Image (cartoon, rainbow, N blue to C red):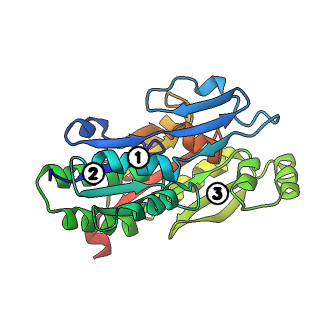
Amino acid sequence: MGPMRIVTDSMARFARPELLARYPVTIVPMRLETAAGPIEDTADIETWDSLRLGDGARMPRLLPPTVDVLGSVYSQLLRETDQILSIHGAARVSAAVNNASAASLQFLGRCDIQVVDSHSFSVGQGLLVEAAIEAAARGEPFDEVVRIVRGMIPRLYMVFFLQDLTYLEQLGQISRSQAILGNMLGIIPFLTIEDGELTPMEKVRSRPRAVEKLIEFVSEFSNVDHLAILHSGLQPTEESRLVAERLQALHPHKAIGLTSYGLATAACIGPESLGVVVLEAAEEVA
């Protein structure tokens, strides 16, 4: 059989997309059910502004790859390999990882499929895929690639805030009445992901204060391997560029990535959110 293969889904976003050319990666598309009709989420999609996310008439709904779709992907890869690493977004945000686990059961005894819950999404998920690419490209054994990826998860942090509490309701964090009242009062929730669970940290009453909370969070890390800002839309916003400048002052020797968090993530957290992904340096947690 050939070398291992890597699978992920289109919720992943990549800090270094050029790495995708170094090793075979299968990216299974998410789909979005929107007021304008179903849309397949791909890396080159350019319909962000036309989705009318959160228009009040019909909330977008994320449709992850089904068990059958993922089973078909694994079946095709089985012709090339008997080792597959499948990395997906946090189960609390997307059902893709649970569907991948269910699909993998069809291949017990024929293919070693390791399904990894990234306990993150977007760039956080993408960082794990990139680490797998680098390890596989340099010839690391399959078990070692899996170990490297799983070992990064405790060092991966994500914080973000939502402009529209309706999305927090959709994620099952608050009730409909709380979402309506919170939006009326201009409340902006500040969240993180801990052990794969969405965890509200604070609520603020202005977007500038929410931005300050992002800066404060990053300032607590003395040494990081990677920093990325997650912004909405196809291009960085002035707000995200300002945050990048502030973070650069905190970590002057690190490149700060500015990445659109993507349509699949927008269906979960809304089109006007802002977030930061931190990969803590390994020596800091040793």
Lower sequence index among marks 1 and 2: 1
Residue that label 1 marks: 72
Residue in the picture at 46% in, 44% down: 229
Inspect this view and state whether residue 221 appears. no
Lower sequence index among marks 3 and 1: 1
Residue in the picture at 52% in, 38% down: 262
Q: Position of residue 111 (x, y in %)?
A: 28, 61
Q: Is residue 149 above or below residue 96?
A: below
- Between residue 33 and residue 158, name the one nearer to us: 33
- Between residue 85 and residue 183, name the one nearer to us: 85
Viewed as shown, does residue 19 lie left or right of 257?
left
Amino acid type for the residue under numbered disc 3? Phe
Amino acid type for the residue under numbered disc 2? Leu
Which element carries disc 2, helix, strand or loop? loop
Q: Quadrant of the C terminus?
A: bottom left
What is the CA distance from the residue labelled 3 to the residue labelled 1?
38 Å
What is the CA distance from the residue labelled 1 to the residue labelled 2?
10 Å
Residue that label 3 marks: 190
Residue that label 2 marks: 78
Q: Position of residue 116 (x, y in %)?
A: 39, 62
What is the CA distance from the residue labelled 3 to the residue labelled 2?
42 Å
Tally the marks: 3
Residue in the picture at 72% in, 62% down: 173
Q: Is the residue under label 1 in contact with that under label 3 (CB below 8 Å)?
A: no
Name the front one of labels 3 and 1: 1
Which element carries disc 1, helix, strand or loop? helix
